[in-house]
Amino acid sequence: MLGKIYITKNSAKMIEHFAQSPQTDKIFSRDEFKVDDVKGVIKEAYMAENFQKKIILEAKNFNIYAQNALLKILEEPPKNIYFIIIAPSKSIFLPTILSRLIVEVIKEKKEKTQIELDFTNLKMEDIFNFIKKHKFKSRNELNELIFAILRQSVESGIDLNTKELENFEKSVVLSSLNSKGYTILTNLLLIIYNKNRK
């Protein structure tokens, strides 16, 4: 195996992972990889090794000249040399680079949106402050809040009936139609507020 390209938005986490590996011998991390940087990589690669040696190249961008300079060594690496390239996007690479290495796209785990409200003891003041804070959210952010409110209300033991659940479905539709976020959020939080008062 000649090497691998990892596509990730979290290159710092990948670098940290490889830095802890005893087999990683050299990390080249740049904002943009240039021809001079490649010269350093090639020099490092030709230092004789009896065991496998990993060379990590990480950058937000690899300019075309640097990629062309890398081609030969990626195609025919010295004995025991394993290249790992880390970048934020596959589209920055020339097809010739992509054809020489295995490409793996790292999916980032998205953290669940948390609602900073106590649903079992919801007050009007809490609702007002929450809406004031979140009224100008984008459509995607608003949808995340809608699902987070639903999830957290269920986790809090609030028993929503069919009509109330339909309100959550309608809220997603209204969000996609660019309805005002504060209207949608007010409606949903008042459902939960009224459940607690019964």
Image (cartoon, helix red, strand yellow):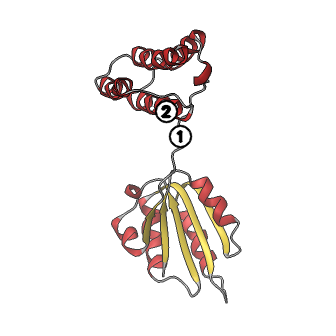
122 and 126: which is toward the camera: 122
Q: Residue at the front extreme?
A: 198
User: Mark 1 Cα within 10 Å, few/some/many (few <14, many 20+)?
Assistant: few
Residue placed under numbered mark 1 in the picture: 112
Q: Position of residue 114 (x, y in %)?
A: 57, 33
Say if 192 sits above or below 28 in the image.
above
Q: What element carries label 2?
A: helix
Say if 29 sits above or below 49 in the image.
above
Residue beneath the point at 41% across and 31% down: 143
Residue 164 got which mark? Answer: none
Say if 182 sits above or below 38 in the image.
above
Residue placed under numbered mark 2 in the picture: 148
User: Mark 2 Cα within 10 Å, few/some/many (few <14, many 20+)?
Assistant: some
- Amino acid type, residue under disc 2 in the picture: Ala
Q: Position of residue 134 (x, y in %)?
A: 50, 20
Residue beneath the point at 63% across and 79% down: 53
74 and 196: which is toward the camera: 196
Q: Earlier in the sequence, mark 1 or mark 2?
A: 1
129 and 103: which is toward the camera: 129
Residue beneath the point at 36% across and 72% down: 99
Q: Where is residue 177 in the image (x, y as percent from the top left)?
A: 28, 23
Say if 19 sits above or below 174 in the image.
below
